[in-house]
Every structure is written in structure tokens, then in C-alpha cells.
């Protein structure tokens, strides 16, 4: 239970940083397949499996909510004032994660080495999304005070697309919301609701419906591809993780008009902290796997 809450918290903190996907963290920590299967089982599975999936997702969701609140109330200021340090942390974590990801799936990658070109597709997809994010003229300008029917529909679609990106390793859902121009208004709206100001609650409800719809539609596709074309999907995911390095470098540009991460503002300390965090996460992953094996025996 506690480990699932921790996993959810790590996903939420990652998703709160422009350029990092909660799906990437799930893949690094080794619970990505279980996450996808549980979502599928909950929406389309049988009664027995649905109950087990519900409790797993509930614990994951509690952790995700805690991580979100942590990001809004405590880490948001840190992301604003120490964005280059935080970006360096996630850069170290992401770069160092690649050898671990490849090692964990090396046999399948060798078996399907002819699908290597999917790495470049993954890199291209993330780079294209980052490009559109940098060109977006809507960032921070979407008004949630007096939304019309089109605005509600726009929020619905934004939520559906963002959650689909959030589930896939690579670029974060927050980056998609930045491209759509609703990230800052939505974060502000969530903050207001938590302070018991419900003026924008319908806008959040519209986006929530879009998120549920996005989960229902994307999980079926992702699960099917991970089962039938795992080699292609693994190379695609590795490509998207590589592409997310570029997304992290460009991440600071989405906050207050900052410059991109460069040799001048790069934090070597933050980079090494990111590597240390990854090793801690890997130790937790190994400890959890060992404990499960002992319990099964």
C-alpha cells in the first residue's frame, strides 16, 4: 500500500515539472505495465479483477493527490525560484534512467532490434510537441471566469490529450496543457478550489471528464500495443525518454519567460542529486521486487 502511494506521489511531482512525464517515472520504477493493466481492468475487466484494480489505483491516486498538493503548496515556489536547479535534477534522473530501462528490457530489445528506428519516431514526437509548446501564443491567456460552450469543449479535449501524454513515458501532460494554453489557469483554478473558492469548479469538471475519457480511450490502445508490439513500443518509449531530455532543457522557457537550460545556468549539484535520486528509486524497486518474491514463495 505505502509503496503504491509513494509511486503515485512521484508521478505527480514529475508531472508538475514541464518536460517530465509521470509515465517515465512509472517506467523507471518498474510499475508501468501494472499501472496500464490496472487501468484497463478497472474500466473493462471483470468484477473480481476490477475490485483489486480499484484499490491499487486508489492508493496510487492518493499518492498522486498528495504529490499534487505538495507541488502546489510547497514545490511551486521552488520550481519558480530554482527552476534551473530543478531542471538539472530531472535531467540527471532522466539521462541516468536510460541504462536502467534498457537493461530491464534488453532481451526483448535484442529480439526486435530491427525496430530500432522507432527510437527516432519517439524523439521526433517529443521534439515536435516541445516546438509547438514554444510557439504557443495561448500560454496563460485562457480565461476560466466566463467560459462558453466551446471553452468547455476545449477544456474537455485538452484534458483527454494531456492524460494520454501523461500515461506515455516522454513528455508530460503539463507540457500538453501548456501548448493548449490552459496549464497556468488550471493550476490557479485548482488552488482557488482548495481555498474554497468554487467560481471555476465547472471548468475543472469539464477537464476532469476529458481526463476520464482520455484514460478510457488511450489505455486500451497502449495496452494492446504493449502486448502485441512490445518491441516497437519499447523502442518508441526509449526514444520519447531521450526526447524528454530536450523537453527538460527547454522547460524553463515555459515559466516566466526564462532562458533554456544551458552550460551557464546548469547546476552540477542538481544533476548529481538527480542521479542519486534515481539510484534510491532503483534500490526501492529492487527491495519491493524481492519482498514480493518472498511473499509469493
Image (cartoon, rainbow, N blue to C red):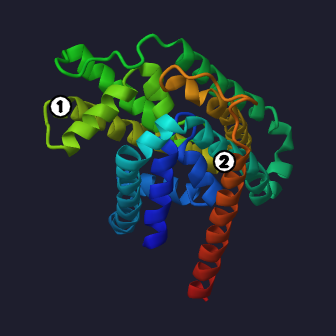
N-term-proximal mark, 2 vs 1: 1
Give me the disc on residue 282: none
Residue 289 makes an appearance in the image: yes
Cα separation between marks 2 and 1? 39 Å
Could you tell me residue 62's position as x and y percent? 35, 60
Q: In which quadrant will I find the C terminus?
A: bottom right
Residue tagged 1: 202
Which of the two residues, 283 or 209, is positioned nearer the viewer here?
A: 283
Secondary structure beneath dot 1 equals: helix
Which of the two residues, 22 or 262, is positioned nearer the viewer here?
A: 262
Residue tagged 2: 270
Q: In which quadrant will I find the N terminus?
A: bottom left
Could you tell me residue 177's position as x and y percent? 43, 27
Q: Is residue 134 above or below residue 232?
A: above
Point 73% across, 53% down: residue: 101
Which of the two residues, 148 or 81, is positioned nearer the viewer here?
A: 81
Tell whether 288 sits left or right of 194. right
Q: Is residue 200 above or below residue 68?
A: above
Quarter of the figure with residue 189: top left
Q: Residues within 10 Å of mark 2 (few under 14, many from 20)?
A: many
Secondary structure beneath dot 2 equals: helix
Point 61% across, 36% down: residue: 84
Quarter of the figure with residue 276: bottom right
Amino acid at each position: 500500500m505505502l509503496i503504491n502511494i509513494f509511486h503515485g506521489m512521484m508521478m505527480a511531482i514529475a508531472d508538475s515539472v514541464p518536460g517530465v512525464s509521470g509515465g517515465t517515472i512509472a517506467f523507471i520504477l518498474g510499475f508501468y505495465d501494472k499501472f496500464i493493466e490496472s487501468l484497463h481492468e478497472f474500466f473493462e475487466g471483470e468484477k473480481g479483477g476490477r475490485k483489486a484494480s480499484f484499490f491499487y489505483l486508489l492508493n496510487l491516486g492518493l499518492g498522486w493527490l498528495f504529490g499534487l498538493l505538495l507541488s502546489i503548496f510547497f514545490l511551486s515556489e521552488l520550481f519558480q525560484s530554482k527552476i534551473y536547479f530543478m531542471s538539472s535534477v530531472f535531467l540527471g534522473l532522466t539521462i541516468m534512467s536510460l541504462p536502467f530501462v534498457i537493461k530491464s528490457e534488453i532481451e526483448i530489445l535484442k529480439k526486435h532490434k530491427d525496430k530500432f528506428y522507432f527510437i527516432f519516431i519517439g524523439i521526433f514526437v517529443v521534439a515536435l510537441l516541445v516546438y509547438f509548446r514554444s510557439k504557443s501564443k495561448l500560454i496563460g491567456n485562457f480565461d476560466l471566469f466566463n467560459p462558453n460552450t466551446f471553452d468547455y469543449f476545449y477544456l474537455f479535449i485538452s484534458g483527454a490529450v494531456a492524460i494520454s501524454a501523461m500515461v506515455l513515458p516522454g513528455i508530460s501532460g503539463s507540457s500538453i496543457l501548456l501548448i493548449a494554453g490552459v496549464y497556468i489557469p488550471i493550476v490557479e483554478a485548482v488552488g482557488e478550489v482548495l481555498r474554497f473558492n468554487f467560481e471555476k469548479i465547472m471548468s475543472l469538471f469539464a477537464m476532469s471528464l476529458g481526463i476520464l475519457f482520455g484514460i478510457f480511450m488511450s489505455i486500451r490502445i497502449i495496452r494492446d500495443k504493449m502486448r502485441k508490439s512490445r518491441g516497437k513500443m519499447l523502442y518508441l518509449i526509449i526514444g520519447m525518454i531521450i526526447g524528454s531530455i530536450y523537453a527538460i532543457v527547454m522547460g524553463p522557457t515555459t515559466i516566466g519567460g526564462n532562458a533554456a537550460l544551458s552550460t551557464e545556468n546548469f547546476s552540477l549539484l542538481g544533476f548529481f542529486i538527480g542521479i542519486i535520486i534515481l539510484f534510491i528509486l532503483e534500490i526501492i524497486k529492487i527491495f519491493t521486487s524481492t519482498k514480493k518474491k518472498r511473499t509469493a514463495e
